[in-house]
Amino acid sequence: MSANGNFSEFAVAAGADLSTQQYKCVTVSGTIASTPGNSIGVLINKPKSGEAARVAFQGHMKAIVGAAVTAADELVVTTSGYLITNATSTSGIVGKALKSAASGALVEFVGNFAIARTSYSIGIV
């Protein structure tokens, strides 16, 4: 697994002990995310409750996958803060895998959590 590339990050207060949750997706309240809609990015440090949780939200990142993914798969956030392959729709995509990874492993991906939504609508002009 290569190191993270260039990414944008910010910090939020950890809302729980996240010292064993590095590389999982988190929420703005500093807890583990369960959907693309409540995820703000990937935890890149190991904070305890109340400490600064560093969150990567855009760029070249790595995260833990909850199921096997293949290079070029579109990724979404699922329960327990894992990323999985998006097999059902165009909703909630947070990034694209750069390499393949087995379930429970780190995947290298490019992503942008700032624009992820749980659903999209197309307007007619």
Image (cartoon, rainbow, N blue to C red):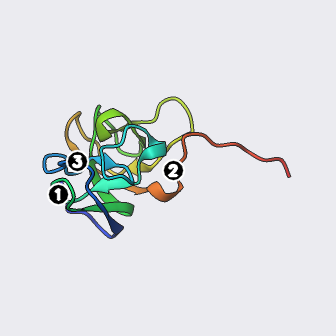
The residue type indicated by label 3 comes to Ala
Q: Is residue 109 left or right of residue 35?
A: left
Structural crowding at the residue carrying mark 2, measured as other residues with C-alpha within 10 Å and reported as few (<14), some (14–19) or many (≥20):
many
In primary-sequence order, the first of circles 3 and 1 is 3
Mark 3 or 1, closer to the camera: 3
The N terminus lies in quadrant:
bottom left
Up-down relation of residue 117 to residue 46 (above or below): above
> Mark 3 or mark 2: which comes first in sequence?
3
Label 3 packing within 10 angstroms: few (<14), some (14-19), many (20+): some
- Element type where label 3 sits in the image: loop
**Residue 21 screen position, x and y as percent:** 19, 46
> Dot 1 surroundings within 10 Å: few (below 14), some, or many (20 or more)?
many
- Residue that carries the numbered disc 1 in the rendered image: 47
How far from the left and from the top, in percent, is residue 107?
27, 47
Amino acid type at mark 1: Pro
Residue at the extreme right: 125
Residue type at numbered disc 2: Ala
Residue visible at 13% across and 46% down in the picture: 20
- Please name the residue that numbered disc 3 is placed on: 16
C-alpha gap between disc 3 and disc 2: 24 Å
Task: Report the residue at 54% width, 40% height from top.
Answer: 118
